Every structure is written in C-alpha cells, then in structure tokens.
Image (cartoon, rainbow, N blue to C red):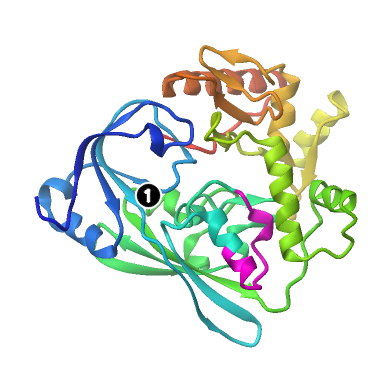
C-alpha cells in the first residue's frame, strides 16, 4: 500500500452516519486531496470496488455492511475568489461543514445562504441533494462546481444548468451517480442582498423577536432557533432530518383531497402543481411519536424518523415502508424518501 492511499479495512461507520447505525465498510479512505482520488482510480484493486461517497453522513441510510470503498470527503478550504458589480464568488471545499460555511459567509458580510443555516451536511453533499429550507435552495446561489470523474480520470467543471437541479434532485443522483465526486463548490452571493422572509415560520419567528428589517445574520439565528426546536440533534438522537420529500401532486388531486380533508396543508407551485406537507400526512395517519422496534417517529415532527437506540438500518427502512403504505392507503399519495438507501 502506498502512502498516498492510506486505506483502512473493516472500518466502522457508526460515527459517520447521523442515524448512528452500526455498519462497517470493507475499505475506507479519508480523502483530503484530489490527488488521492486519482491514486484510487489508478489502482486496479481499488478502482474496481463499489464506491460510496460520504460527507456528513446525514443523507444516507445504511441497511447493511458496505462491501466496497467509502470515500470520506475531508478536504477543507474557503476562499473569496473574485467579484463583479453584482456578486461575490466564494469557493468552498467539499469536506467543509455546510453550516460552518454559511456562518463564514455571514461573518464576511455575504448574505444569501442564511435560510439554509444548520442543515447537517457537508458542502460537497449540498448540491447532490439540492438542499433547501425556508424558501431557498442551493441552486439559487450555486455558480459552478468541480468534480472528479472516475470514468475518465479527469476533473469536470459544471455550471448550475449542467447540474440539472430539481426539487431535492440533481445530475449526481442520475447520470453522474457512482461516477463523479464533488471536489469544491463556487457560490455567487449577491452584493445587493434582500431578505427572504416569505416563509411563514421564519416571518413569525422574526416578528416575535421584533425584527421588521432583519439582517442576514438575524435571519440565520431565527432559522437556527426554529430548527433547534423542531429537529433532534443527531449527536443525541440518531436521525437524518426530514426523511420524506414533500409530494407534488396535480391541482385536481389536491382539490379532491381538500374536499375530504379541509385542513390539508398544501402550497401552490409555479407550474400549477401543489406541494403537500408530508409531515401533515404522516401525522394524520397517527405516526407521530410512535415506535417500530428500536426506530420511531419524532414526537415534535412527524417528518423525522429517529433511532431510539440500537436500531438497525433495516428497522428504519421497514418503518419508512410502513409509513409509505399507510399514507398511500389513506391519501393515495406515495411518499419518496430523501436519504439514499445503501
């Protein structure tokens, strides 16, 4: 084994997934440079293994041991690389903590990402999922990114359009899945910043604080307060945040449901479709606070599945499938999980 590829074998992953599931990887590599990925690709015995890219481990559910190579992106760096009349370009390495990066931008007087505060992912994982919260998505400010392509051994540069962003979706879940590993991401943050406080929960929090014209840092603090109240800390209770996507249905389907369920929570979309609140649907099926073996549904938010202690990935997956079945039987809507099942 060469010093450039410090592989660890039979590696425990419990501390590398926010569900805290016990699972092991056949091989593990802490990636701190692009050269390490190139070295892996040049080594036939490693390049032939199945690959799993890990960031913060908050968007995966490990249902068994992983028989391949885990690439744990751990490169760190944040730089202001340039600016123009309207935006400042900031580049962050894939291994940076997303929340830490957001706080860095705010500390440097750069607004835009504050609504995405306290999301427990890495910078490299954020575009894969096109993370979003409180009216903002990563795609709104992403300018470009660089990724290592295992098929060609070359570095790709993709702009926002290349990434094929959609609701909790991107090209990295489709054509570039298991092929490209994000190295760093560049964001274009506006110089003429405007507060985005259209989301009712954020507006209410700011109103309670008496902040009629909040700064970006004050919005971030409000979002942190909301998320802290609603979502469990993964270091205390294993979870992956919101487990299901909010389903998008036709206006006809939404209107039919409203006739039967007048309190249905829904949000009109620009294309005439409606987004339904998955947490409300789950709650109506009586799942909030319930347990399924060692897994369960969080007492404060039905959209969050939790590890109550010692839950296996299979238990959590079975709980998710049971919830999907119940929601489908009652509402005729099939929920789609956000985490990737491994």
As drawn, the residue found furthest toward the bottom would be: 85
Label 1: state its secondary structure.
loop
Left/right placement of residue 87 relative to residue 72 reads right
Question: Horizontally, is 282 left or right of 335 in the view?
Answer: right
Which quadrant of the structure image shows residue 196?
A: bottom right
109 magenta-colored? yes
- Between 254 and 123, the one nearer to me in the picture: 123
Q: Is residue 247 above or below residue 306?
A: below
Q: How many numbered discs?
A: 1
Which residue is more in the foreground, 320 or 109? 109
Residue 26 coordinates in the image, percent (x, y): 22, 35
Q: Which residue is mark 1?
A: 177
Tell me: residue 322, above or below residue 5.
Answer: above
Q: Identify which residue is drawn at 12% across, 53% down.
A: 43
Q: Dot 1, how many residues are within 10 Å of its Cα: few (below 14), some (14-19), or many (20+)?
A: few
Q: Is residue 66 left or right of residue 295?
A: left
Percent position (x, y) of residue 235? Answer: 52, 35
Q: Position of residue 289 (x, y in %)?
A: 67, 19
Q: Residue at x 80, y 46 (%)?
A: 201
Q: Which residues are magenta?
A: 104-118
Q: Quadrant of the C terminus?
A: top left
Name the residue located 54 percent from the left edge and 61 percent from the top edge: 101
């Amino acid at each position: 084994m060469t010093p450039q590829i410090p592989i660890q074998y039979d590696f425990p992953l419990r501390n590398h997934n926010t569900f805290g599931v016990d699972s092991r990887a056949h091989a593990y590599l802490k990636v701190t440079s692009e050269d390490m990925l190139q070295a892996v690709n040049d080594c036939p015995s490693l390049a032939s293994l199945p690959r799993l890219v890990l960031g913060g481990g908050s968007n995966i559910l490990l249902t068994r041991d992983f028989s391949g190579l885990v690439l744990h992106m751990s490169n760190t760096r944040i730089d202001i690389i340039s600016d123009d009349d309207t935006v400042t370009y900031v580049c962050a390495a894939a291994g940076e903590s997303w929340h830490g990066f957001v706080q860095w931008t705010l500390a440097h007087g750069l607004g835009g990402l504050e609504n995405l505060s306290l999301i427990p992912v890495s910078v490299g994982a954020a575009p894969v999922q096109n993370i979003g919260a409180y009216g903002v998505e990563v795609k709104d400010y992403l300018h470009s990114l660089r990724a290592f392509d295992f098929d060609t051994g070359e570095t790709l540069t993709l702009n926002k359009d290349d990434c094929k962003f959609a609701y909790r979706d991107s090209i990295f879940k489709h054509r570039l899945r298991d092929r490209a590993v994000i190295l760093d991401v560049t964001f274009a943050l506006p110089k003429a910043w405007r507060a985005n406080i259209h989301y009712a929960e954020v507006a209410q929090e700011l109103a309670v604080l008496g902040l009629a014209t909040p700064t970006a840092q004050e919005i971030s603090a409000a979002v942190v307060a909301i998320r802290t109240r609603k979502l469990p800390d993964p270091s205390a209770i294993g979870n992956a945040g919101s487990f299901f996507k909010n389903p998008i249905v036709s206006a006809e389907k939404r209107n039919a449901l409203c006739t039967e369920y007048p309190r249905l929570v829904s949000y009109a979309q620009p294309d005439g479709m409606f987004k339904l609140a998955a947490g409300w649907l789950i709650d109506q099926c009586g799942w909030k606070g319930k347990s399924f073996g060692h897994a369960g549904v969080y007492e404060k938010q039905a959209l969050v599945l939790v590890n109550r202690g010692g839950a296996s990935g299979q238990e959590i997956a079975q709980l998710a499938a049971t919830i999907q079945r119940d929601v489908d039987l009652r509402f005729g809507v099939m929920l789609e999980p956000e985490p990737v099942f491994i």
